[in-house]
Image: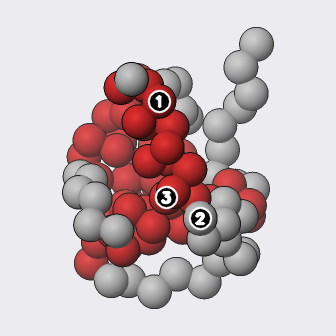
Amino acid sequence: MEPERSLNDPSARAAAIHTFKHLKHHGYAFEPDLVHSWAVIHRWKTDDALQLSEYASGVLSGKPYHSAPDPIGRQAIDRWRSQAESVRA
């Protein structure tokens, strides 16, 4: 059984917000509507899928969010790039 996906957990909320901040800072494009579709396809609850896309939109527009410290770390983008490269190889 897959774990329940919920943004009610402060750490999960912070991870979502910081993920979008990392992507934006490093010049990666993402579209809130596609983020919503991805979450729905991956069986997120309706409210959480909508909230995730709202965080994506907010980060893109520069909205300041107050969240827990970044739980994924400043080097997350490097890990993601490395993982993406290993998939391509």
Residue that label 1 marks: 86
Q: Is residue 25 above or below residue 53?
A: below
Query: How much space separates mark 3 and mark 1, taking CA atoms?
Result: 14 Å
Label 3 vs label 1, nearer the camera: 1
Position of residue 40 relative to residue 64, above or below, is above
Residue density around tag 3, few if under 14, some if 14–19, many if 20 or more, within 10 Å: some
Q: Amino acid at mark 3?
A: Ile
Q: Nearer the viewer, mark 1 or mark 2?
A: 1
Location of mark 3 (residue): 77
| Percent coordinates x, y for residue 27 in the rendering | 26, 66
Q: Residue 66's spot in the image, x, y percent?
A: 60, 83
As rendered, which of 14 and 6 lies closer to the eye? 14
Question: Residue at (37%, 53%) from the top-left corner?
Answer: 53
Residue denoted by label 2: 75
The quadrant of the image that shows the C terminus is: top left
Report if the CB atoms under discs 3 and 1 are less than 8 Å apart: no
In this rendering, the answer to whether 53 lies above or below 57 is above
- Which of disc 2 and disc 1 is earlier in sequence? 2
Q: Residue at x 27, y 78 (%)?
A: 61
Q: Residue at x 71, y 20 (%)?
A: 2
Tag 1, which secondary structure? helix
